[in-house]
Amino acid sequence: MINDAKPAFKPIAAAGVLKKLLADHFYALDRAAKERTAKVAWCTSVGPVELLRAMGFEVYFPENHGAMLGASRMSTDLIPAANAVGYSPEVCSYMTSDIGSFIRKQTPLQKAYKGIEGVPRADVLVYNTNQCGDVKDWLAFYGRQWGAPVVGVETYRNVGPVTDAHVAGIAGQLQAMVPALEAAAGAKLDPERLRETLRLSRRCSELWREVLETAAHAPAPLTFFDGTIHMAPAVVLRGTQAAVDYYETLLSELRRRVRDGVPAVDGERFRLYWDGMPVWGKLRDLSALFLELRAAVVASTYCNSWIFSQLDPDKPWESMARAYTELFIVRDSGYKEDHIGRMLELYHCDGIVFHDSKTCPNNTNSRYGLPQRLRKRTGVPFVVIHGDLNDLRCYSEEQSRTQLEAFIEQLQDRKSSPSTDYSPPRGGGE
Ligand code: SF4
């Protein structure tokens, strides 16, 4: 280990505002479901929330609930309840945690928000398979429970250059959903409201990008671990003024940190890139470990996935289709390699941590030689840790700690004698 001293976490003051925003979000959903003040739509996290928001739905995101189940460490106890009704331990552990939570009637919402007993019942469930196919099966479970319609977009996968044909295909599917959504909403889609929602969503995305890019400064004012918390409005409140206001507040705070040289990691010595899902139940431990190692995880594929700069109020269908298709997760490995290469340069990274997440192959990019190709091309070393987003039975704290400490030692040796050949720690390579 490089340092014995334990530097302190630097809480971000805007977190207080975030807490209130999220409470408002969940209480509004709960009211809508119980008192029928609005219709409730469930939506996958990368869209098409803009369309639903524009139709007046209160929008609920099951993946956000999945992350809460992981972060509260309830998942590992709840997953077996989903396994028992036929959902394999090998499939998305957001889904199995969430289904287990529904079966057992246990949710972190009960503890966090007094009076909320469960997730809001859906009037319609809307998926987009741009992340993966599991989301469709996930929402279908609730559709059967409640007899609610399940509609969605079947996306392209492994896309290289995004062509007009891709965009037209997805735009057509989005438009084809409108009659079913209007029936569930009991109202017609208002084109002007759609344009306004897209404007707000685009602004939210731009601000979120600026927030993340403050970490290009050295020392970085925030890390990936802060990002996983503060990305919540970009996911659950995209398309609202509240999300825009929040990111303006957060950005001002981070710009002050940059101006005053306030680092997220005291004595920042190494700058890392994180690829793959967070290990939600171990965020705090991993964050503490990196602090201890004076390593700032300054950028990630995950946090950057909620930037939708393509959204254009003047071309609503085309721009939504483009935004949902140009996403990192939808793209082929050539695109992914280029993208991560650009990120390494922008954020001046010394190394990459790949998280091979057992139940999320779609957000795992270390299984087909990409780390080795990147290493060859950029010279940036990497390490692969094995774990899972929610199922902590797949994660060994001991092993990850040993690997990460060894990786940092390697980076240290490289800095001390740059000409020394890099010899990868266990789990890493070139
Ligand atoms: S992308 Fe991964 S985490 Fe997200 S729903 Fe699919 S399998 Fe689950």
Image: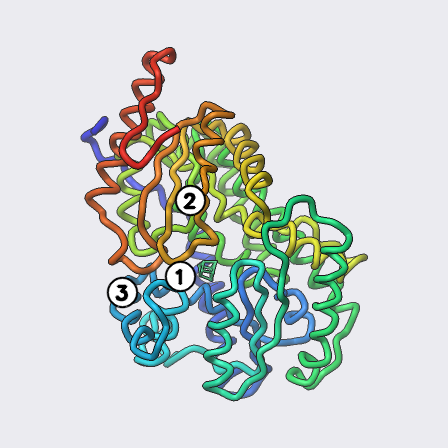
Q: Secondary structure at mark 3?
A: helix
Quadrant where the N terminus lies? top left
Residue type at numbered disc 1: Ala
Viewer-side residue, 180 vs 287: 180
Q: Residue at x 69, y 70 (%)?
A: 54
Residue appearing at x 37%, y 78% in the figure: 102
The numbered mark at residue 76 is 3
Local packing at callout 1 (Cα closer than 10 Å; few below 14, some 14-19, many 20+) is: many
**Position of 190 compared to 34: left or right?**
right
Q: Are marks 2 and 3 in contact (CB under 8 Å)?
A: no
Which residue in the structure is indicated by mark 2? 367
Relative to 11, is 18 above or below? Answer: below
Q: Position of residue 384 (x, y in %)?
A: 35, 39
Circle 3 packing at 10 Å, graded few (<14), some (14-19), many (20+), is: some
Asked if residue 246 lies left or right of residue 402, the reply is: right
Residue 49 is labelled as none
Q: What numbered label is drawn on residue 67?
A: 1
Name the kind of residue labelled 2 in the image: Arg
Q: CA distance from mark 2 to mark 1?
A: 23 Å
Quarter assignment of residue 8: top left
